[in-house]
Image: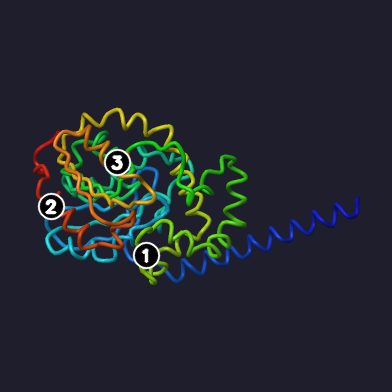
Amino acid sequence: MTILFVLLALVLLVLLGLAWFTHRTAGRIEAFLPPKGRFVDVPGARLHVRESGSGPAVLLIHGLGGQGAHFDYGVADYLARNHRVVVVDRPGSGHSTRDAATPADVSSQAASLAALIDRLGLERPTVAGHSLGGAIALTLALEHPGKVGALALIAPLTHLQDAAPEVFKALAIESPWLRKLFAWTLATPGSIAGGKKVLAAVFAPESAPRDFPVKGGGMLSLRPRQFLASSADMQALPGHMPRVQARYRELSVPTGVLYGREDAILDWQQNGQALADKVAGARLQLVDGGHMLPVTQPQLVAEFVEQCARTAAPAHIAS
């Protein structure tokens, strides 16, 4: 009994030490990478947004586990020459927060972005979504059709996958209490230890820039609240994506899809080609590259978004 008590005490001390390290690390990261934009309150969330430029609006939506800084490698600056560019941290990601009672599904996130479009007076922007941001952009166009002028989808998730990519397996912990325990103990030190391996997998076959943890906001993903938000995002997909997929033939806005042939996270045929086959007039563009095109090939991505913006429905036309 004494030995068992000592072992339990040691485990508790280790867990407390890990929780202290996680809390301390998260505080340091947020102090080092403070918000650069402003906050806009919408139902269910407080969104961190950054704006630049003027002209027809473009809304940029990042993917799973990311933040708006993924567009800081040139996409936002290039587009701001001719457009009003709004970069948003999705609910729960980056510096945005999501109310505890608000679901993480794509429909709820699309509703938050529809409210943001209204609050900012964007008038049917071109909506550019990367990865999971692509699924949310599609949901926004389907469920709030009057809010979107065109879709520019970059390596989008468009169809539910049988299993999550290996690099995201930790986000699949089903038990809420175990997920929270993991987030506040092992997730941060584990991510620090395996960070290079994770980035290599996500960017493959291209390489992550050395400044991605800072310039690309990668360090923000080390915080427990972002781990929990990303886990909720991913686990909400099976309950909503099938309904979204079933409606793709209803899309009436101009739609462009950009995919890297060597994407190691999402297959271009299962997501890019499969969507293009269902959406009338959709244009699929394939390039040499991987999943993180906004970071690795920003000029190409910006030109693609701008081409899609030229096809956008006029602001005064409602679907």
Local SS, label 1: loop
Q: Is residue 67 left or right of residue 227?
A: left
Does 199 appear above or below 319?
below
Mark yes or no: residue 111 visible.
Answer: no
| CB-based contact (under 8 Å), mark 2 and mark 3 | no
Mark yes or no: residue 196 visible.
Answer: yes
Q: Position of residue 63 (x, y in %)?
A: 36, 51
* Quarter of the view holding residue 143: top left
Q: Position of residue 131 (x, y in %)?
A: 33, 48
Q: Amino acid at mark 3?
A: Gln
Q: Nearer the viewer, mark 2 or mark 3?
A: 3
Q: Position of residue 305 (x, y in %)?
A: 18, 53
Q: Amino acid at mark 2?
A: Gln
CA gap, disc 1 and disc 3: 23 Å
Near mark 1 (Cα within 10 A), the count class, few <14, some 14-19 or many ≥20, is some
User: Which residue is painted at 62% across and 44% down in the image?
Assistant: 177
Q: Which mark is residue 269?
A: 3
CA gap, disc 2 and disc 1: 26 Å
User: Which residue, given by chain and number where applicable, does mark 1 sit on?
Assistant: 207
Q: Is residue 184 left or right of residue 6?
A: left
Query: Of marks 2 and 1, which one's residue comes earlier in the chain?
Result: 1
User: Which residue, given by chain and number where applicable, does mark 2 sit on?
Assistant: 307
CA gap, disc 2 and disc 3: 22 Å
Near mark 2 (Cα within 10 A), the count class, few <14, some 14-19 or many ≥20, is few
| CB-based contact (under 8 Å), mark 2 and mark 1 | no
